Image (cartoon, rainbow, N blue to C red):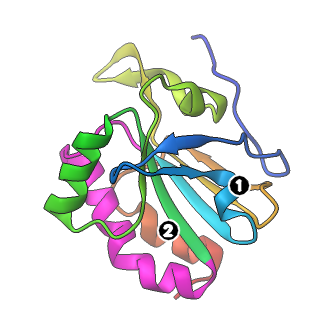
Amino acid sequence: MNETARLSAGDTAPDWSLPTDNGDRLSLKDLRGRRVVLYAYPAAMTPGCTTQACDFRDSLASLQAAGYEVVGISPDVPAKLAKFRERDAITFPLVSDEDKSVLTAYGAFGEKQNYGRTVMGVIRSTFVIDENGVIERALYNVKATGHVAKLRRDLGID
């Protein structure tokens, strides 16, 4: 299997500037000075991705109180992200990486197993980035359900 290069704690987070669901652009530089939870998901409005986004939405207040900003990234076009945000009352930015260059730079796009077949796609992943843009945690192949609760426990957030 062709392994995409993965990030590890201590690596500098690849910089990015991407369109958001509301037509603005958001870049990692804009978030300097704050800790960031960047999570990669395959497709807006699918069951697993909806569960995960709603878990982040429901945990946003406690994550922000602990100093974290949450950003979701997928290859969906901004218009689809806007529908997703509206449908599920998502309260954090969703960024569009249509050419998958940022997902690839983070090791979150590549070969993965899907129903026993090897396919190319988004690898559900979460990155915790510190105030200076350094990776604190790089979590790959996370589960859609229960991941946010586990992440909060790992970060010591009630």
Q: Secondary structure at mark 1?
A: helix
Q: Secondary structure at mark 2?
A: helix
Q: How many marks?
A: 2
Amino acid type for the residue under numbered disc 2: Lys
Residue that mark 1 sits on: 29
Q: Residue at x 57, y 61 (%)?
A: 37
Judge from the rendering whether residue 13 lies leftward or rightward of residue 66; answer left or right: right
Q: Residue at x 75, y 64 (%)?
A: 130
Closest to the observer: 136 or 22? Answer: 22
| Residue 32 x/y as whole percent | 73, 64
Packing grade of label 1 (10 A; few <14, some 14-19, many >=20) is few
Residue 57 disc label:
none
**Residue 55 is covered by the magenta coloring:** yes
**Start and end of the magenta stretch?**
41-67
Judge from the rendering whether residue 12 lies leftward or rightward of residue 37; answer left or right: right
The span from disc 2 to disc 1 (Cα, nearest Å) is: 27 Å
| Residue 155 x/y as whole percent | 63, 74
Q: Is residue 130 above or below residue 21?
A: below
Residue that mark 2 sits on: 150
Packing grade of label 2 (10 A; few <14, some 14-19, many >=20) is few
Question: Is the magenta region chiefly helix, strand or loop?
Answer: helix
**Circle nearer the viewer, 2 or 1:** 1
**Residue 124 is covered by the magenta coloring:** no
